[in-house]
Amino acid sequence: MTNLQPETQKKPSAVSRLTYALLLLLILIAGAYVRFVGIDWGEYQYLHPDERFLIWVGADIQPVENLAQYFDAANSSLNPENRGHPFYVYGTLPMFITRYLAEWAYERVGFNEMTDMGRTLSALVDWLVILLVYAVARRAYDQRVAILAAAFSAFAVLQIQQSHFFTMDTFVNLFTLLAIYY
């Protein structure tokens, strides 16, 4: 009996699925490596102006004890404007997450602690972008294109550079790709 399915509609074999899974795993490992290696570069000199400002704001804001304090924008200690930063134009969700995690991980939160936590989260979020690029490409095209797209994302120099700073760019990429995926 002959196969009536077109060549493009054949189901991938177990070997093929395993090969793609291994390729994706290698891409993710390599992507994590280039994002996390040297994450403490610069010896806390704060050379990136956006990173320096974000760390300053993160060190100045203070966690709130309840939701009522959070939603009281005029008095909230999480509101950068109330802490001497009226020109804060970046997203607050990544800042709040970073500040709360730094508060949880360290006894005291200052510039160095915000740098360490912010850069780690930035690298982690950018690593998740690689997975999302794969997922979007797989949904839109196929697994071959998805592997290629993930590899391009993993080794894109600008993404790697941004993941070594605590800036909002990597977070914006994540939320944008989540919106595209859904």
Image (cartoon, rainbow, N blue to C red):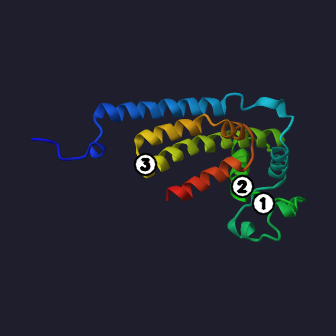
Residue 77 horizontal/vertical position (percent): 81, 61
- Residue placed at 82% from the left, 71% from the top? 74
- Residue placed at 25% from the left, 46% from the top? 6
Circles 1 and 3, Cβ within 8 Å, touching? The answer is no
Quarter of the image that includes the N terminus: top left
Which circle marks residue 96 in the picture?
Answer: 2
Looking at the picture, tell me which residue is in the foreground, 62 or 153: 153
**From mark 2 to mark 3, how far is it between C-alphas?**
36 Å
Going from the N terminus, do you reach mark 2 or mark 1 first?
1
SS under mark 1? loop
Where on the picture, by quarter, is residue 71? Answer: bottom right
Q: Is residue 70 left or right of residue 87?
A: left
Going from the N terminus, do you reach mark 1 or mark 3 first?
1
SS under mark 3? loop
Residue at the left extreme?
Answer: 1
What amino acid does circle 1 point to?
A: Leu
Circles 2 and 1, Cβ within 8 Å, touching? The answer is yes
Looking at the picture, tell me which residue is in the foreground, 135 or 46: 135
Where on the picture, by quarter, is residue 163? Answer: top right
Disc 3: which residue:
141
**From mark 1 to mark 3, how far is it between C-alphas?**
43 Å
Disc 1: which residue:
78
Circle 1 packing at 10 Å, graded few (<14), some (14-19), many (20+), is many
Where on the picture, by quarter, is residue 156? Answer: top right
Residue at the right extreme?
Answer: 84
Residue 147 horizontal/vertical position (percent): 47, 38
